[in-house]
Amino acid sequence: MEAALDELGRRGVVIRQVSPWYRTAPVPASDQPWYVNAVAELEIDLAADALLAQLHEVEDAFGRVRTVPNAARLIDLDLLDFNGEIAAGGPGRATLPHPRMEGRAFVLKPLADLAPDWRHPRTGSSIQALLAALPADQVIERL
């Protein structure tokens, strides 16, 4: 993941800060291996769709092969929020905010580390309220 962040930097993306790294069980629960997750705050002079394309290019460069939804993967770079924009998405277009982020501890916990005052752009829910509403079965361990 650090190499992927370095690659984004080589492509003109400024990495402003990165959360602590976390080890997490797969969501939805499965027999897949655990993942390592973090959230990064980026600075870039591109639109959300162009940034999403950059993220996918980096995934491809690191060997990501897309098969079926929720399949085990070597790398997964998601665009969670883009300056509070709300966008419906579509093929090759960013859905903003990320449509499943509010139910995932592996997203919310590192996001709370970086932005403890963050609010969901669509619902207005605080990061603390979203964390409190998570199911207890989502295991997350700080590395």
Image (cartoon, helix red, strand yellow):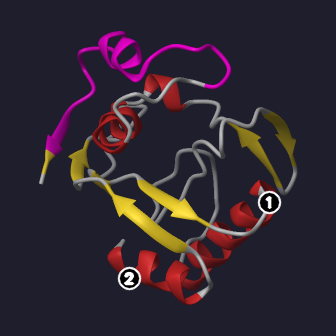
Q: Kindly indicate the quadrant of the structure image that contains residue 139.
A: top left
Q: Is residue 74 left or right of residue 10?
A: left
Q: In this view, does 94 lie to the left or right of 115?
A: right
Q: Can you say which quadrant of the picture contains the N terminus?
A: bottom left
Identify residue for label 2.
Answer: 3
Residue drawn at (64%, 31%), measured in percent from left and top? 99
**How far from the left and from the top, in percent, is residue 141?**
14, 42
Q: Which residue lies furthest to the right in this view?
A: 91
135 falls in the magenta region: yes
Residue at image location 46% in from the left, 23% down from the top? 103
* Crowd around label 2: few <14 · some 14–19 · many ≥20 (10 Å): few
Question: Relative to 72, does residue 57 appear above or below in the rendering?
Answer: below
Please name the amino acid that badge 2 sits on: Ala
Q: Is residue 132 left or right of residue 142?
A: right
Reply above or below: 51 against 139: below
Q: Residue 4 carries which label?
A: none
Disc 1 to disc 2, how far (Cα)?
Answer: 23 Å
| Residue 62 seen anywhere in this rendered image of the structure | no
State which quarter of the image contains the C terminus: bottom left
Which residue has dot 1 on it? 47
Magenta span covers which residues? 121-141
Which circle's residue, 1 or 2, is located before the other in the chain? 2
Q: Based on the picture, tell me whether residue 105 belongs to the magenta stretch.
A: no
The amino acid type found where label 1 is placed reads Ala
The residue carrying pointer 1 sits among few (fewer than 14), some (14 to 19) or many (20 or more) residues within 10 Å by Cα, namely few
Which image quadrant for residue 49? bottom right
- Mark 1 against mark 2, which lies toward the viewer? 1
**Label 1 secondary element:** loop
